[in-house]
Amino acid sequence: MLQLENLSFQVADESDSRKEIIKNLNLTIDNHRFIVITGPNGGGKSTLAKLIMGIEKPTGGRILFNGQDITELSITERAKCGISFAFQQPVRFKGIKVKDLITLAAGDALSTAGACEYLSKVGLCARDYINRDVDASLSGGELKRIEIATVLARNTALSVFDEPEAGIDLWSFNNLIKVFEDLHDIDSDRSLIIISHQERILNIADEIVVIADGQVKAQGRRENILPELLQDTGSCRFYQEVQ
Amino acid sequence: MDAIQKELLEQVAGLHEMPAGAYNIRANGEAVARSTTAHIDIVTKTDKSGIDIVIKPGTKKESVHIPVVLSQSGLTEMVYNDFYIGDDCDVTIVAGCGIHNSGDQMSKHDGIHTFYIGKNSHVKYVEKHYGSGEGTGERIMNPETVVELQENSFMELETVQIRGVDSTRRSTRATLADGAKIIVTEKLMTHGKQYAETSFDVDLNGEGSSANVISRAVARDDSRQLFLAKINGNNRCVGHSECDAIIMDNAKISAVPEITANHLDAELIHEAAIGKIAGEQIVKLMTLGLTEAQAEAQIVNGFLK
Ligand SMILES: Nc1ncnc2c1ncn2[C@@H]1O[C@H](COP(=O)(O)OP(=O)(O)OP(=O)(O)O)[C@@H](O)[C@H]1O
Ligand SMILES: [Mg+2]
Protein backbone atom coordinates (compact mmCIF):
# COMPACT_ATOMS: atom_id res chain seq x y z
CA MET A 1 0.00 0.00 0.00
CA LEU A 2 2.65 2.50 1.06
CA GLN A 3 6.31 2.48 0.13
CA LEU A 4 8.86 4.96 1.34
CA GLU A 5 12.05 4.75 -0.70
CA ASN A 6 15.28 6.39 0.45
CA LEU A 7 13.27 9.13 2.05
CA SER A 8 15.23 12.08 3.45
CA PHE A 9 14.21 15.30 5.08
CA GLN A 10 16.71 18.02 5.90
CA VAL A 11 16.22 21.42 7.42
CA ALA A 12 18.61 24.30 7.84
CA ASP A 13 19.30 24.81 11.53
CA GLU A 14 20.35 27.98 13.38
CA SER A 15 23.99 27.81 12.35
CA ASP A 16 22.72 27.37 8.80
CA SER A 17 24.20 23.93 8.55
CA ARG A 18 21.94 21.11 7.39
CA LYS A 19 20.16 19.02 9.93
CA GLU A 20 18.91 15.65 8.78
CA ILE A 21 15.69 14.66 10.48
CA ILE A 22 14.81 11.69 8.27
CA LYS A 23 17.78 9.83 6.86
CA ASN A 24 17.47 7.70 3.77
CA LEU A 25 14.55 5.87 5.26
CA ASN A 26 12.99 2.80 3.66
CA LEU A 27 9.69 1.39 4.81
CA THR A 28 6.98 -0.72 3.18
CA ILE A 29 3.49 -1.05 4.60
CA ASP A 30 1.20 -3.69 3.15
CA ASN A 31 -2.56 -3.65 2.80
CA HIS A 32 -4.69 -4.39 5.82
CA ARG A 33 -1.99 -3.74 8.34
CA PHE A 34 -2.22 -2.28 11.79
CA ILE A 35 1.14 -0.64 12.27
CA VAL A 36 2.33 1.11 15.39
CA ILE A 37 5.34 3.37 15.03
CA THR A 38 7.24 4.04 18.21
CA GLY A 39 10.63 5.32 19.30
CA PRO A 40 12.27 8.01 21.36
CA ASN A 41 11.11 11.63 21.48
CA GLY A 42 12.57 13.64 18.65
CA GLY A 43 13.27 10.48 16.65
CA GLY A 44 11.37 11.73 13.60
CA LYS A 45 7.98 9.99 13.88
CA SER A 46 5.79 13.07 13.46
CA THR A 47 8.02 14.31 10.68
CA LEU A 48 7.59 11.00 8.87
CA ALA A 49 3.80 11.23 9.24
CA LYS A 50 3.85 14.76 7.81
CA LEU A 51 5.93 13.56 4.87
CA ILE A 52 3.35 10.85 4.17
CA MET A 53 0.49 13.38 4.29
CA GLY A 54 2.41 15.90 2.19
CA ILE A 55 2.60 18.55 4.91
CA GLU A 56 6.37 18.45 4.56
CA LYS A 57 8.15 17.76 1.28
CA PRO A 58 11.06 15.32 1.35
CA THR A 59 14.47 16.58 0.29
CA GLY A 60 15.19 13.17 -1.21
CA GLY A 61 13.54 9.87 -2.05
CA ARG A 62 10.08 8.82 -3.18
CA ILE A 63 6.72 7.95 -1.71
CA LEU A 64 4.50 5.43 -3.48
CA PHE A 65 0.86 4.91 -2.57
CA ASN A 66 -0.85 1.91 -4.15
CA GLY A 67 1.89 1.90 -6.76
CA GLN A 68 1.45 5.57 -7.68
CA ASP A 69 4.31 8.01 -7.08
CA ILE A 70 2.76 10.67 -4.85
CA THR A 71 5.98 12.47 -3.89
CA GLU A 72 4.99 15.60 -5.81
CA LEU A 73 1.30 15.56 -4.91
CA SER A 74 -0.16 18.28 -2.69
CA ILE A 75 -1.84 17.62 0.65
CA THR A 76 -5.26 17.96 -1.00
CA GLU A 77 -4.41 15.47 -3.73
CA ARG A 78 -3.10 12.95 -1.23
CA ALA A 79 -6.22 13.41 0.88
CA LYS A 80 -8.27 12.64 -2.21
CA CYS A 81 -6.13 9.57 -2.99
CA GLY A 82 -7.16 8.13 0.36
CA ILE A 83 -4.75 9.27 3.04
CA SER A 84 -5.92 10.89 6.26
CA PHE A 85 -4.02 12.24 9.23
CA ALA A 86 -4.80 13.06 12.85
CA PHE A 87 -2.40 15.69 14.17
CA GLN A 88 -0.39 15.23 17.33
CA GLN A 89 -1.36 18.80 18.20
CA PRO A 90 -4.77 19.45 16.67
CA VAL A 91 -5.48 22.87 15.22
CA ARG A 92 -7.99 25.30 16.70
CA PHE A 93 -10.15 27.65 14.63
CA LYS A 94 -12.35 30.68 15.16
CA GLY A 95 -15.92 30.25 14.00
CA ILE A 96 -15.71 26.68 12.70
CA LYS A 97 -18.02 24.31 14.51
CA VAL A 98 -17.42 20.67 15.34
CA LYS A 99 -20.21 19.78 12.93
CA ASP A 100 -18.62 21.85 10.13
CA LEU A 101 -15.29 20.10 10.54
CA ILE A 102 -16.79 16.61 10.56
CA THR A 103 -18.98 17.43 7.57
CA LEU A 104 -15.99 18.74 5.61
CA ALA A 105 -14.11 15.57 6.54
CA ALA A 106 -16.95 13.32 5.38
CA GLY A 107 -16.80 15.19 2.07
CA ASP A 108 -20.54 15.31 1.42
CA ALA A 109 -23.67 16.53 3.09
CA LEU A 110 -23.79 14.78 6.40
CA SER A 111 -26.87 14.68 8.58
CA THR A 112 -26.52 15.84 12.16
CA ALA A 113 -27.18 12.25 13.18
CA GLY A 114 -24.32 11.10 10.94
CA ALA A 115 -21.92 13.62 12.46
CA CYS A 116 -23.06 12.64 15.95
CA GLU A 117 -22.21 9.02 15.29
CA TYR A 118 -18.54 9.86 14.80
CA LEU A 119 -18.50 11.88 17.99
CA SER A 120 -20.10 9.04 19.95
CA LYS A 121 -17.41 6.70 18.68
CA VAL A 122 -14.73 8.84 20.28
CA GLY A 123 -16.70 9.02 23.50
CA LEU A 124 -18.11 12.52 23.24
CA CYS A 125 -21.75 13.12 23.99
CA ALA A 126 -22.68 14.42 20.56
CA ARG A 127 -25.48 16.70 21.69
CA ASP A 128 -23.08 18.71 23.87
CA TYR A 129 -20.41 19.10 21.23
CA ILE A 130 -21.90 19.18 17.77
CA ASN A 131 -22.51 22.95 17.78
CA ARG A 132 -19.45 24.00 19.69
CA ASP A 133 -16.68 25.98 18.05
CA VAL A 134 -13.41 24.15 17.50
CA ASP A 135 -11.63 26.91 19.40
CA ALA A 136 -9.70 27.58 22.56
CA SER A 137 -12.73 26.76 24.70
CA LEU A 138 -12.27 23.01 24.11
CA SER A 139 -10.04 21.09 26.50
CA GLY A 140 -6.98 19.30 25.15
CA GLY A 141 -8.61 15.87 25.44
CA GLU A 142 -11.84 17.03 23.79
CA LEU A 143 -9.91 18.53 20.90
CA LYS A 144 -7.91 15.35 20.49
CA ARG A 145 -11.08 13.25 20.28
CA ILE A 146 -12.64 15.58 17.73
CA GLU A 147 -9.45 15.28 15.69
CA ILE A 148 -9.82 11.50 15.73
CA ALA A 149 -13.50 11.82 14.77
CA THR A 150 -12.55 13.87 11.67
CA VAL A 151 -10.26 11.07 10.53
CA LEU A 152 -12.97 8.45 11.13
CA ALA A 153 -15.34 10.57 9.04
CA ARG A 154 -12.85 10.67 6.20
CA ASN A 155 -13.06 6.91 5.88
CA THR A 156 -9.85 6.51 3.87
CA ALA A 157 -7.73 3.51 2.89
CA LEU A 158 -4.81 4.75 4.97
CA SER A 159 -5.27 6.56 8.27
CA VAL A 160 -2.33 7.96 10.19
CA PHE A 161 -2.80 8.94 13.83
CA ASP A 162 -0.06 10.82 15.66
CA GLU A 163 -0.19 9.94 19.36
CA PRO A 164 -3.99 9.71 19.46
CA GLU A 165 -4.05 8.56 23.07
CA ALA A 166 -2.19 11.58 24.44
CA GLY A 167 -4.46 13.43 26.85
CA ILE A 168 -7.27 10.88 26.59
CA ASP A 169 -8.47 9.70 30.01
CA LEU A 170 -8.14 6.13 31.19
CA TRP A 171 -11.81 5.27 30.95
CA SER A 172 -11.91 6.19 27.28
CA PHE A 173 -8.79 4.28 26.45
CA ASN A 174 -10.54 0.94 25.95
CA ASN A 175 -13.11 2.56 23.70
CA LEU A 176 -10.39 4.19 21.69
CA ILE A 177 -8.67 0.88 21.14
CA LYS A 178 -11.97 -0.57 19.99
CA VAL A 179 -12.34 2.31 17.53
CA PHE A 180 -8.98 1.45 15.96
CA GLU A 181 -9.74 -2.24 15.82
CA ASP A 182 -13.11 -1.62 14.20
CA LEU A 183 -11.57 0.75 11.69
CA HIS A 184 -9.06 -1.90 10.78
CA ASP A 185 -11.75 -4.55 10.40
CA ILE A 186 -14.03 -2.56 8.05
CA ASP A 187 -12.44 -4.00 4.92
CA SER A 188 -9.39 -5.89 3.91
CA ASP A 189 -7.61 -3.09 2.05
CA ARG A 190 -7.46 -0.65 4.87
CA SER A 191 -4.31 0.12 6.83
CA LEU A 192 -3.71 2.08 9.97
CA ILE A 193 -0.54 3.72 11.16
CA ILE A 194 -0.57 4.83 14.77
CA ILE A 195 2.32 6.67 16.32
CA SER A 196 2.38 5.84 20.00
CA HIS A 197 4.47 5.30 23.09
CA GLN A 198 1.72 3.35 24.87
CA GLU A 199 2.16 -0.31 25.61
CA ARG A 200 -1.58 -0.90 25.31
CA ILE A 201 -1.56 0.44 21.78
CA LEU A 202 1.60 -1.48 20.92
CA ASN A 203 -0.24 -4.56 22.17
CA ILE A 204 -2.87 -4.43 19.44
CA ALA A 205 -0.50 -3.86 16.51
CA ASP A 206 0.17 -6.52 13.89
CA GLU A 207 3.46 -4.86 13.21
CA ILE A 208 5.73 -2.51 15.11
CA VAL A 209 8.18 -0.08 13.53
CA VAL A 210 10.82 1.54 15.71
CA ILE A 211 12.08 4.88 14.49
CA ALA A 212 15.03 6.60 16.09
CA ASP A 213 17.43 9.17 14.81
CA GLY A 214 15.50 9.49 11.54
CA GLN A 215 15.85 5.85 10.61
CA VAL A 216 13.98 2.57 10.93
CA LYS A 217 15.75 0.74 13.72
CA ALA A 218 13.47 -2.27 13.67
CA GLN A 219 10.38 -3.48 11.91
CA GLY A 220 8.56 -6.73 12.43
CA ARG A 221 5.63 -8.58 13.87
CA ARG A 222 4.57 -7.49 17.32
CA GLU A 223 5.51 -10.83 18.85
CA ASN A 224 9.07 -10.33 17.76
CA ILE A 225 9.59 -6.66 18.53
CA LEU A 226 7.53 -5.99 21.62
CA PRO A 227 9.35 -8.21 24.14
CA GLU A 228 12.59 -6.47 23.46
CA LEU A 229 11.02 -3.01 23.61
CA LEU A 230 9.46 -3.75 26.96
CA GLN A 231 12.69 -4.57 28.67
CA ASP A 232 14.11 -1.79 30.74
CA THR A 233 14.27 1.04 28.21
CA GLY A 234 17.72 1.95 29.43
CA SER A 235 19.03 -1.31 28.10
CA CYS A 236 16.88 -1.43 24.99
CA ARG A 237 19.06 -1.47 21.97
CA PHE A 238 16.67 0.62 19.90
CA TYR A 239 16.87 3.45 22.35
CA GLN A 240 20.53 3.00 23.14
CA GLU A 241 21.63 3.52 19.60
CA VAL A 242 20.54 7.13 19.61
CA GLN A 243 22.12 8.07 22.90
CA MET B 1 -39.74 48.25 -7.08
CA ASP B 2 -37.70 46.51 -9.76
CA ALA B 3 -35.75 43.26 -9.57
CA ILE B 4 -32.45 44.97 -8.69
CA GLN B 5 -34.04 46.89 -5.86
CA LYS B 6 -35.71 43.73 -4.58
CA GLU B 7 -32.37 41.92 -4.61
CA LEU B 8 -30.73 44.76 -2.66
CA LEU B 9 -33.58 44.66 -0.17
CA GLU B 10 -33.11 40.97 0.37
CA GLN B 11 -29.36 41.44 0.89
CA VAL B 12 -29.60 44.24 3.42
CA ALA B 13 -32.77 43.39 5.29
CA GLY B 14 -33.41 39.73 4.49
CA LEU B 15 -36.78 40.76 3.07
CA HIS B 16 -38.55 38.82 0.33
CA GLU B 17 -41.79 40.68 0.82
CA MET B 18 -43.17 43.47 2.93
CA PRO B 19 -42.21 42.82 6.55
CA ALA B 20 -44.58 42.47 9.46
CA GLY B 21 -44.73 45.42 11.83
CA ALA B 22 -43.65 48.95 11.05
CA TYR B 23 -41.50 49.75 8.06
CA ASN B 24 -40.31 52.48 5.78
CA ILE B 25 -38.62 51.52 2.55
CA ARG B 26 -36.62 54.14 0.72
CA ALA B 27 -35.57 53.59 -2.88
CA ASN B 28 -33.59 56.09 -4.96
CA GLY B 29 -34.22 58.88 -2.52
CA GLU B 30 -37.96 58.43 -2.10
CA ALA B 31 -40.15 56.56 0.34
CA VAL B 32 -41.81 53.75 -1.62
CA ALA B 33 -43.62 51.97 1.17
CA ARG B 34 -44.48 52.69 4.76
CA SER B 35 -46.45 51.03 7.47
CA THR B 36 -47.03 52.03 11.08
CA THR B 37 -48.54 50.17 14.01
CA ALA B 38 -50.57 51.15 17.05
CA HIS B 39 -47.30 51.62 18.97
CA ILE B 40 -44.84 52.69 16.33
CA ASP B 41 -45.24 55.83 14.28
CA ILE B 42 -43.10 56.95 11.36
CA VAL B 43 -43.20 60.62 10.37
CA THR B 44 -41.45 62.32 7.48
CA LYS B 45 -39.25 65.19 8.56
CA THR B 46 -40.27 68.58 7.24
CA ASP B 47 -37.02 70.49 7.72
CA LYS B 48 -34.65 67.98 6.12
CA SER B 49 -34.53 64.61 4.45
CA GLY B 50 -35.37 61.72 6.77
CA ILE B 51 -37.88 60.33 9.20
CA ASP B 52 -38.73 60.28 12.88
CA ILE B 53 -39.53 56.87 14.31
CA VAL B 54 -41.50 57.19 17.51
CA ILE B 55 -41.98 54.14 19.67
CA LYS B 56 -44.45 54.41 22.54
CA PRO B 57 -43.41 53.45 26.06
CA GLY B 58 -44.06 49.80 26.88
CA THR B 59 -43.92 48.56 23.28
CA LYS B 60 -42.73 44.93 23.36
CA LYS B 61 -41.72 42.38 20.75
CA GLU B 62 -42.26 44.69 17.80
CA SER B 63 -39.96 45.46 14.90
CA VAL B 64 -39.21 48.32 12.55
CA HIS B 65 -37.54 47.86 9.16
CA ILE B 66 -36.08 50.92 7.48
CA PRO B 67 -33.94 49.71 4.57
CA VAL B 68 -32.55 52.03 1.93
CA VAL B 69 -31.72 50.98 -1.62
CA LEU B 70 -30.03 52.94 -4.38
CA SER B 71 -29.95 51.64 -7.91
CA GLN B 72 -29.60 54.88 -9.84
CA SER B 73 -25.98 55.61 -10.69
CA GLY B 74 -24.82 59.05 -9.61
CA LEU B 75 -27.36 59.52 -6.85
CA THR B 76 -26.05 61.00 -3.61
CA GLU B 77 -28.14 61.58 -0.55
CA MET B 78 -27.90 62.60 3.07
CA VAL B 79 -30.58 61.27 5.40
CA TYR B 80 -31.39 62.01 9.03
CA ASN B 81 -33.36 59.39 10.93
CA ASP B 82 -34.23 59.93 14.57
CA PHE B 83 -35.51 57.17 16.82
CA TYR B 84 -37.45 58.10 19.94
CA ILE B 85 -37.84 54.97 22.00
CA GLY B 86 -39.96 55.28 25.12
CA ASP B 87 -39.34 53.63 28.49
CA ASP B 88 -39.78 49.88 29.01
CA CYS B 89 -39.70 48.89 25.35
CA ASP B 90 -38.28 45.75 23.75
CA VAL B 91 -37.92 46.26 20.00
CA THR B 92 -35.83 45.23 17.01
CA ILE B 93 -34.82 47.76 14.40
CA VAL B 94 -33.41 46.61 11.08
CA ALA B 95 -31.75 49.23 8.93
CA GLY B 96 -29.36 48.69 6.08
CA CYS B 97 -28.29 50.14 2.81
CA GLY B 98 -27.76 48.51 -0.54
CA ILE B 99 -26.27 50.30 -3.54
CA HIS B 100 -26.29 48.89 -7.05
CA ASN B 101 -24.16 50.98 -9.35
CA SER B 102 -23.99 49.95 -12.97
CA GLY B 103 -22.86 53.35 -14.22
CA ASP B 104 -19.66 55.34 -14.02
CA GLN B 105 -20.77 57.98 -11.55
CA MET B 106 -20.40 57.81 -7.81
CA SER B 107 -23.43 56.70 -5.78
CA LYS B 108 -23.42 57.72 -2.17
CA HIS B 109 -25.61 57.31 0.88
CA ASP B 110 -24.78 59.18 4.06
CA GLY B 111 -27.02 58.80 7.04
CA ILE B 112 -27.17 59.95 10.59
CA HIS B 113 -29.20 57.73 12.88
CA THR B 114 -29.85 59.11 16.32
CA PHE B 115 -31.33 56.95 19.04
CA TYR B 116 -32.90 58.21 22.24
CA ILE B 117 -33.46 55.07 24.27
CA GLY B 118 -35.74 55.33 27.30
CA LYS B 119 -35.29 53.78 30.72
CA ASN B 120 -35.24 49.98 30.97
CA SER B 121 -35.69 49.59 27.24
CA HIS B 122 -33.98 46.97 25.14
CA VAL B 123 -33.20 47.75 21.51
CA LYS B 124 -31.64 45.43 19.04
CA TYR B 125 -30.38 47.33 16.02
CA VAL B 126 -29.09 45.52 12.94
CA GLU B 127 -27.46 47.33 10.04
CA LYS B 128 -26.15 45.68 6.88
CA HIS B 129 -24.30 47.31 4.04
CA TYR B 130 -23.99 45.84 0.61
CA GLY B 131 -22.93 46.95 -2.83
CA SER B 132 -23.26 45.42 -6.29
CA GLY B 133 -23.15 46.37 -9.96
CA GLU B 134 -20.46 46.18 -12.61
CA GLY B 135 -20.13 49.92 -13.18
CA THR B 136 -16.96 51.83 -12.48
CA GLY B 137 -18.83 54.37 -10.36
CA GLU B 138 -17.92 54.18 -6.70
CA ARG B 139 -20.36 52.97 -4.06
CA ILE B 140 -19.94 54.99 -0.92
CA MET B 141 -21.68 54.83 2.45
CA ASN B 142 -20.93 56.90 5.51
CA PRO B 143 -23.23 55.95 8.35
CA GLU B 144 -23.18 57.82 11.60
CA THR B 145 -24.91 56.41 14.64
CA VAL B 146 -25.51 58.43 17.77
CA VAL B 147 -26.95 56.71 20.80
CA GLU B 148 -28.19 58.09 24.10
CA LEU B 149 -28.91 55.35 26.56
CA GLN B 150 -30.96 56.26 29.62
CA GLU B 151 -30.97 54.44 32.97
CA ASN B 152 -30.83 50.64 32.75
CA SER B 153 -31.45 50.56 29.03
CA PHE B 154 -29.65 48.09 26.79
CA MET B 155 -28.70 48.28 23.14
CA GLU B 156 -27.33 45.55 20.94
CA LEU B 157 -25.87 46.97 17.79
CA GLU B 158 -24.86 44.64 14.97
CA THR B 159 -23.26 45.91 11.81
CA VAL B 160 -22.27 43.88 8.81
CA GLN B 161 -20.48 44.93 5.64
CA ILE B 162 -19.22 42.04 3.57
CA ARG B 163 -19.30 43.03 -0.09
CA GLY B 164 -19.22 45.75 -2.60
CA VAL B 165 -18.84 49.00 -0.67
CA ASP B 166 -15.90 50.96 -2.08
CA SER B 167 -15.53 53.44 0.68
CA THR B 168 -17.07 53.68 4.08
CA ARG B 169 -16.55 55.81 7.15
CA ARG B 170 -18.62 54.54 10.01
CA SER B 171 -18.86 56.48 13.18
CA THR B 172 -20.71 55.35 16.29
CA ARG B 173 -21.00 57.48 19.39
CA ALA B 174 -22.76 56.43 22.55
CA THR B 175 -23.36 57.94 25.97
CA LEU B 176 -24.58 55.74 28.78
CA ALA B 177 -26.45 56.63 31.96
CA ASP B 178 -26.57 54.59 35.20
CA GLY B 179 -26.90 50.86 34.63
CA ALA B 180 -27.05 51.21 30.85
CA LYS B 181 -25.33 48.70 28.63
CA ILE B 182 -24.25 48.51 25.00
CA ILE B 183 -22.88 45.60 23.02
CA VAL B 184 -21.55 46.32 19.55
CA THR B 185 -20.58 43.58 17.12
CA GLU B 186 -19.09 44.56 13.82
CA LYS B 187 -18.30 42.26 10.90
CA LEU B 188 -16.38 43.73 8.07
CA MET B 189 -14.74 42.43 4.95
CA THR B 190 -13.04 44.59 2.36
CA HIS B 191 -11.63 43.58 -0.99
CA GLY B 192 -10.30 45.15 -4.18
CA LYS B 193 -9.21 48.72 -3.51
CA GLN B 194 -11.82 49.39 -0.85
CA TYR B 195 -11.32 51.56 2.18
CA ALA B 196 -13.22 51.18 5.43
CA GLU B 197 -12.90 53.17 8.59
CA THR B 198 -14.88 52.52 11.73
CA SER B 199 -14.73 54.55 14.86
CA PHE B 200 -16.42 53.96 18.17
CA ASP B 201 -16.63 56.58 20.82
CA VAL B 202 -18.27 55.49 24.01
CA ASP B 203 -18.78 57.58 27.15
CA LEU B 204 -19.55 55.47 30.16
CA ASN B 205 -21.04 58.25 32.29
CA GLY B 206 -23.39 56.25 34.46
CA GLU B 207 -22.63 54.22 37.54
CA GLY B 208 -22.66 50.52 36.67
CA SER B 209 -22.76 51.17 32.92
CA SER B 210 -20.96 48.84 30.53
CA ALA B 211 -19.81 48.66 26.93
CA ASN B 212 -18.49 45.79 24.87
CA VAL B 213 -17.28 46.53 21.33
CA ILE B 214 -16.30 43.48 19.29
CA SER B 215 -14.98 43.77 15.77
CA ARG B 216 -14.11 40.93 13.41
CA ALA B 217 -12.57 42.08 10.18
CA VAL B 218 -11.00 40.62 7.06
CA ALA B 219 -9.07 42.73 4.57
CA ARG B 220 -8.04 41.19 1.26
CA ASP B 221 -6.50 42.29 -2.06
CA ASP B 222 -5.34 45.92 -1.84
CA SER B 223 -7.97 47.09 0.62
CA ARG B 224 -7.32 49.15 3.72
CA GLN B 225 -9.05 49.35 7.07
CA LEU B 226 -8.78 51.59 10.07
CA PHE B 227 -10.37 50.64 13.38
CA LEU B 228 -10.63 53.26 16.11
CA ALA B 229 -12.15 52.49 19.48
CA LYS B 230 -12.32 55.05 22.21
CA ILE B 231 -13.88 54.23 25.54
CA ASN B 232 -14.04 56.75 28.37
CA GLY B 233 -14.81 55.43 31.82
CA ASN B 234 -16.29 58.35 33.73
CA ASN B 235 -17.86 56.42 36.59
CA ARG B 236 -17.81 52.95 38.13
CA CYS B 237 -18.16 51.03 34.89
CA VAL B 238 -16.84 48.22 32.72
CA GLY B 239 -15.58 48.73 29.17
CA HIS B 240 -14.10 46.25 26.77
CA SER B 241 -13.16 46.54 23.13
CA GLU B 242 -11.73 43.89 20.91
CA CYS B 243 -10.50 43.98 17.33
CA ASP B 244 -9.67 40.68 15.74
CA ALA B 245 -8.56 40.94 12.13
CA ILE B 246 -7.31 38.73 9.33
CA ILE B 247 -5.08 40.32 6.76
CA MET B 248 -4.60 38.81 3.28
CA ASP B 249 -2.78 39.62 0.03
CA ASN B 250 -1.58 43.25 0.02
CA ALA B 251 -4.14 44.62 2.42
CA LYS B 252 -3.39 46.96 5.30
CA ILE B 253 -5.14 47.19 8.65
CA SER B 254 -4.61 49.55 11.57
CA ALA B 255 -6.25 49.22 14.95
CA VAL B 256 -6.05 52.19 17.28
CA PRO B 257 -7.39 51.52 20.74
CA GLU B 258 -7.88 54.25 23.25
CA ILE B 259 -9.18 53.69 26.75
CA THR B 260 -9.37 56.44 29.30
CA ALA B 261 -10.25 55.97 32.95
CA ASN B 262 -11.51 59.14 34.59
CA HIS B 263 -12.76 57.31 37.64
CA LEU B 264 -11.03 55.00 40.11
CA ASP B 265 -13.56 52.22 39.61
CA ALA B 266 -13.55 52.22 35.83
CA GLU B 267 -12.40 48.85 34.50
CA LEU B 268 -11.32 49.09 30.89
CA ILE B 269 -9.74 46.54 28.60
CA HIS B 270 -8.72 46.65 25.00
CA GLU B 271 -7.61 43.70 22.91
CA ALA B 272 -6.41 43.85 19.32
CA ALA B 273 -4.94 41.15 17.14
CA ILE B 274 -4.12 41.36 13.46
CA GLY B 275 -2.56 38.52 11.55
CA LYS B 276 -2.76 36.35 8.50
CA ILE B 277 -4.69 33.08 8.49
CA ALA B 278 -2.75 30.55 10.52
CA GLY B 279 -0.98 28.23 8.07
CA GLU B 280 -1.81 25.20 10.17
CA GLN B 281 -5.53 25.92 9.84
CA ILE B 282 -5.24 25.80 6.07
CA VAL B 283 -3.14 22.62 6.29
CA LYS B 284 -5.71 20.90 8.50
CA LEU B 285 -8.54 21.65 6.06
CA MET B 286 -6.39 20.51 3.13
CA THR B 287 -5.89 17.16 4.86
CA LEU B 288 -9.68 16.87 4.77
CA GLY B 289 -9.56 17.20 0.98
CA LEU B 290 -10.16 20.94 0.51
CA THR B 291 -7.99 22.91 -1.88
CA GLU B 292 -6.01 25.79 -0.48
CA ALA B 293 -8.53 28.31 -1.84
CA GLN B 294 -11.48 26.38 -0.44
CA ALA B 295 -9.75 26.12 2.92
CA GLU B 296 -9.14 29.87 2.98
CA ALA B 297 -12.76 30.62 2.09
CA GLN B 298 -13.99 28.28 4.81
CA ILE B 299 -11.80 29.94 7.43
CA VAL B 300 -12.82 33.47 6.41
CA ASN B 301 -16.52 32.57 6.33
CA GLY B 302 -16.34 30.99 9.73
CA PHE B 303 -14.46 33.95 11.14
CA LEU B 304 -17.13 36.39 9.96
CA LYS B 305 -20.13 34.20 10.75
N1 LIG C 1 10.92 22.24 10.72
C1 LIG C 1 11.87 21.81 11.56
N2 LIG C 1 12.98 22.55 11.77
C2 LIG C 1 13.95 22.14 12.63
N3 LIG C 1 13.87 21.01 13.34
C3 LIG C 1 12.78 20.24 13.19
C4 LIG C 1 11.72 20.61 12.31
N4 LIG C 1 10.75 19.66 12.40
C5 LIG C 1 11.21 18.76 13.28
N5 LIG C 1 12.43 19.09 13.76
C6 LIG C 1 13.26 18.30 14.70
O1 LIG C 1 13.32 17.00 14.19
C7 LIG C 1 13.32 16.06 15.21
C8 LIG C 1 12.19 15.06 15.01
O2 LIG C 1 10.95 15.67 15.35
P1 LIG C 1 9.59 14.88 15.37
O3 LIG C 1 8.52 15.82 15.78
O4 LIG C 1 9.41 14.20 14.08
O5 LIG C 1 9.86 13.81 16.52
P2 LIG C 1 8.91 12.69 17.12
O6 LIG C 1 9.57 11.40 16.89
O7 LIG C 1 7.53 12.85 16.61
O8 LIG C 1 8.97 13.04 18.66
P3 LIG C 1 7.85 12.92 19.83
O9 LIG C 1 7.85 11.52 20.29
O10 LIG C 1 8.38 13.84 20.89
O11 LIG C 1 6.54 13.39 19.28
C9 LIG C 1 13.25 16.84 16.50
O12 LIG C 1 14.55 16.98 17.00
C10 LIG C 1 12.67 18.17 16.07
O13 LIG C 1 13.10 19.18 16.91
MG1 LIG D 1 5.73 13.46 17.45
Image (tube, coloured by chain):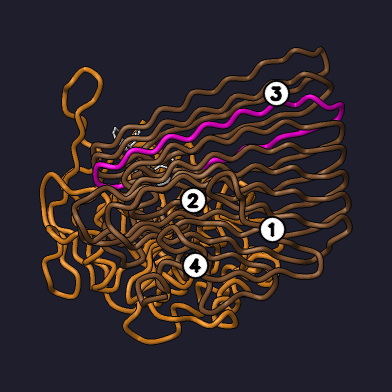
Chain colours: A orange, B brown
Labels 2 and 1 touching (C-beta < 8 A): no
| Quarter of the image that includes the C terminus of chain A | top left
Q: Which residue is mark 1?
A: A170
* Circle on res. A100: 4
Which chain is indicated by disc 2?
A: A
Query: Which secondary structure lies at badge 1?
Result: helix
Q: Position of residue A198 (x, y in %)?
A: 54, 54
Identify which residue, A29 or B90, lies in the foreground.
B90
Q: Which residue is mark 2?
A: A93
Q: Separation of disc 2 and disc 1 at Cα?
A: 27 Å
Q: Residue at x 53, y 65 (%)?
A: B25
**Left-right relation of A125 to B237:** left
Q: Residue at x 52, y 30 (%)?
A: B272
The mark closer to the camera, 3 or 4, is: 3
Which chain is indicated by disc 1?
A: A
Amino acid identity at mark 2: Phe
Labels 2 and 4 touching (C-beta < 8 A): no
Query: Which secondary structure lies at badge 4?
Result: helix
The mark closer to the camera, 1 or 4, is: 4
Mark 1 neighbour density, 10 Å: few (under 14) some (14–19) many (20 or more): few
Amino acid identity at mark 3: Leu
Q: Residue at x 19, y 42 (%)?
A: A9
Q: Separation of disc 2 and disc 4 at Cα?
A: 11 Å
Query: Which secondary structure lies at badge 3?
Result: strand
- The magenta stretch spans which residues? B191-215
Q: Separation of disc 3 and disc 4 at Cα?
A: 35 Å
* Circle on res. B268: 3
The mark closer to the camera, 1 or 3, is: 3
Q: Separation of disc 1 and disc 3 at Cα?
A: 43 Å
What is the quadrant of residue A219 in the picture? bottom left
